[in-house]
Amino acid sequence: MAISVLVINCGSSSIKYALISERREDRIYGLAENLGAADARIKGITVGGEALELSIPYADHAKALETLLERLANYNPQAIGHRVVHGGNITQAERLTQQTIDRIRDAIPLAPLHNPANLIGIEATMSLFPQLPQVAVFDTAFHQTMPEHAYRYAIPQFLYTEHQVRRYGFHGTSHAYVTERASELAGQKNQGGWLSAHLGNGSSTCAVWNGQSIDTSMGLTPLEGVVMGTRSGDVDPSLHLFLANNLGWDIQKIDNMLNKESGLLGLSGLSNDMRTLVEASEKGHEDATLAIEVFCYRLAKSLSALSCGLPRLDGLVFTGGIGENSAYVREKTLAYLPHFGLQFSKENNDTLARGTEGRIDAGTGPQIWVIPTDEEGRIAKETRQVLAQIA
Ligand code: ADP
């Protein structure tokens, strides 16, 4: 039987949704935003591809979900798949039971901004639709295959054994989808060694061997790793001490600065948005030029580091808003990786249409792909798999 899955991605003041049928290519999708405020609204695309905008003043998560689900009821979703950011040491998607909900709650200290919002969405849909099976798909689960030497920090053991301090990694559904898709297009689905770069407002890299994550750039939190829109990525851990001793900053101020005022925004002093920076750089904005250079260099450095975990490199994949759309960032990053033996095709890179899959190497050496990510599609697929296993 073809199953329509409603995918819910619940943030602190917004809910992304998508209704994904196995049979129909058309998707119904959209966003409920500004929840709790006077201008709360739902913006989306209906099944005919038409734009939908609906005002829902002061609606909270439950009210917004109720409105959404009333509108979608005609399409008869048979299951709900929730994106959950942190699953602790859960290794795969799970049907939502009280035990799974407790484990999501237990992981709140590891994702204090995301997991509580995810739980609000889960609780609202469970009380509104108690008859529908619901599945949690975790951002962290794909990376649970990392070997211990990749996920442990070199800090005292008890912090791991008693407090679960280790590297978890995020963006798992995206890395899993794009590397599976690229390897499939290369004619060797889930085989060989692949590197992926998910580059959006949050960015991370991942090394995948025979379909399994073996290392990734994000760690205990999504702050570790490459340069992001407003996040610093890796810094010297003693930066905290330096700022506390010399500027009198407390830990909250430092954390806020590293998460919200750093990255492309901090370096450029202009914007966290790559498109804005590329345009400014073309007009001679030196700090924008530097921000892009640091972003590309540090990305290449991360890909090089992760390649150590791969017995062989078969290909590299770019995805996320920047990876899918910026030929300039792709070219600059690849220029820092001459030792990978990549044969870059500038022509393919420059002519690849926005939002399309395409190969940007010249046909020899490791393949280089641009794959638009599909986290919702992957969540729907994993939801169906969980339900099939327990049917
Ligand atoms: P999120 O992580 O919030 O899902 P996205 O994956 O949508 O973010 O990526 C957003 C980023 O993609 C922004 O920095 C935006 O500037 C960038 N982006 C989108 N289109 C382009 C483009 N044509 N050139 C450069 N950057 C782009």
Image: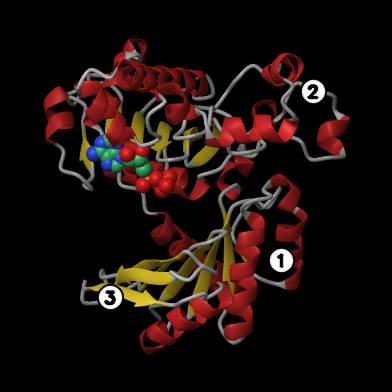
- Residue at 67% across, 59% down: 116
Q: Say which residue label 3 marks.
A: 46
Coloured how?
A: secondary structure
Residues 50 and 102: in front is 50
Proximity of marks 2 and 3: CB atoms separated by less than 8 Å: no
Q: Say which residue label 1 marks.
A: 101
| Image label count | 3
Q: Is residue 391 visible?
A: no
Mark toward the start of the polypeptide (1 vs 2): 1
Q: How many angstroms separate mark 3 from mark 1 (CA)?
A: 31 Å
Mark toward the start of the polypeptide (3 vs 1): 3
Q: How many angstroms separate mark 1 from mark 2 (CA)?
A: 30 Å
Q: What residue type is labelled 2?
A: Ile
Report x, y in % for residue 9: 50, 62
Proximity of marks 3 and 1: CB atoms separated by less than 8 Å: no
- Residue at 41% across, 71% down: 41
Q: On the rendered image, what quadrant is the N terminus found in?
A: bottom left
Residues 249 and 381: in front is 249
Farthest-out residue, top: 339
Judged by depth in the image, the label closer to the viewer, 3 or 1, is 3
- Residue at 64% across, 83% down: 127
For residue 155, the mark is 2
Report x, y in % for residue 91: 64, 51
* Pointer 1 local density, CA inside 10 Å: few below 14, some 14–19, many at least 20: some
Report x, y in % for residue 233: 54, 27
Q: What element carries label 3?
A: loop
Q: What element carries label 1?
A: helix
Residues 384 and 298: in front is 298
Q: In this view, does 274 lie to the left or right of 260?
A: left
Mark toward the start of the polypeptide (2 vs 3): 3
Q: On the rendered image, what quadrant is the C terminus found in?
A: bottom right
